[in-house]
Amino acid sequence: MPGYRFNTVSELRVGLGASRQTGALCAQLGITRPLVVTDPGLVSLGLLEPVKKDLEQTFAAVSIFSEVSADPSESVVLSALETLRDNQADGVIGLGGGSSMDVAKAVAILADSDQALSDMYGVDQVRGWRLPLILIPTTAGTGSEVTPVAVITTGKTTKAGISSSKLLPDVAVLDAELTVGLPAHVTAMTGIDAMVHAIEAYTSKIKKNPLSDMLAQRALFLLSHHQRRVLTNPEDLGAREAMLLGATLAGQAFANAPVAAVHALAYPLGGHYHMPHGLSNALMLPAVLRFNASVCEQQYLELSELLPQPVGQGLEGFVHWFECLIADAGLPTSLAEASVPEDDLQMLAADAMNQQRLLVNNPVEVDEAAATALYRSAWSGWA
């Protein structure tokens, strides 16, 4: 096989209560004035408090930016950067879902840079280095804590990504205690998002490799065997830790064998309707699995062996397993049910063509006509 490259975070810490050691981690990295980047929802749930208390016991100056929104805009990034500079922070901690971690990544590289944010979009466009960076996920989904990408909303319906190995943090901390207070629908959507990461990494066209395959397989096993347990017993910390680790392994997989058509078609849904990313991925997954089967059915059958029983026969059994999981989680099972107008499908397909960075990884070519057909299939749904 052709040569390949595999990059990931240099240190990963896993354990219940691990986030309460953030102060010591900061000190090891030479941070003396940390900035925590998070969102108001986590503040209201009380999930910031353990980390904040630990930091305040270690440092005299701790600053908080808690205004991260879903699908964060450039203005949010720049506001967080202003908070960092006003408080002379010398290190960044991203606490939350993908949005908070992505903003933390961007702030860490902008802090001492002469580059404009807009000049960093694309692959390997970042010059210089960044401030010390710690990422602490509170959802088992995005894998952003181990990916070299930050996605920022650049316009009313558009997003752009910064892709650079410099965005990998110094340390990623997995503490399942931080995931306990999340609403069930968030747990469901983020878990399915992580499974999509694993599936798309395993079938990625260009950079698929043995290491990403191994991680994707283990990720799908952990996620699929524990998602229902977490939803029926939210206090099951063992299951939550398995989900959190599964999401991180999936993140390591797709950071090196990138995602493809499911994500490319999901992004316009998020941009136009502010649909949560995990939900948009879930809605597009069955249609894309069937579309790709002409090339990678065997790979899907290999993955089906990792799922908990019962799984039906062949490709349809594999796809139906995910359809049942999505429906049983109480999520919409069609774009129509998610209030996407049928008249918008052609527009969405045209927008998806702007996601060539992702579409080139799909095992089957997706042109605008194919994208329209995939959206139409997802609009009809399966329940």
Image (spheres, rainbow, N blue to C red):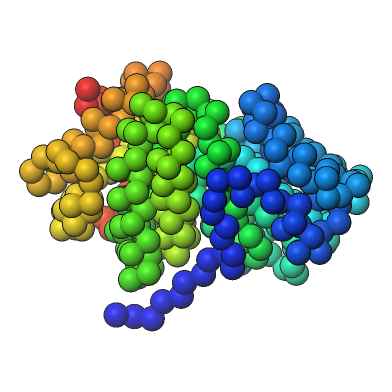
Front residue (pair 68, 74): 68
Farthest residue in the left direction? 313
Nearest the viewer among 328 and 152 is: 328
**Residue 116, percent across and down?**
77, 55
Tell me residue 306's x, y (percent).
23, 51
In the rendered image, the quadrant that contains the C terminus is: top left
User: Is 380 on the left or on the right of 38, as rendered?
Assistant: left
Please state the horizontal and vertical placement of residue 219, each as a whole percent of the image.
Answer: 36, 53
Tell me how many marks there are: 0
The image quadrant of residue 325 is top left
Q: Quadrant of the N terminus?
A: bottom left
Where is residue 127, by image quadrant?
Answer: bottom right
Q: Is residue 379 above or below residue 359?
A: above
Q: Residue at x 42, y 60 (%)?
A: 253
In screen coordinates, is 381 left or right of 359?
left
In the rendered image, is residue 355 in sight? no
Identify which residue, 141 or 373, lies in the foreground. 141
Q: Which residue corresponds to the image point at 39% horizontal and 21% vertical from the top-left?
A: 338
Above or below — where is 272 with respect to 10? above
Task: Identify the residue shown where x is 32% and y is 33%.
Answer: 228
**Can residue 22 be seen in the rendering of this structure?**
yes
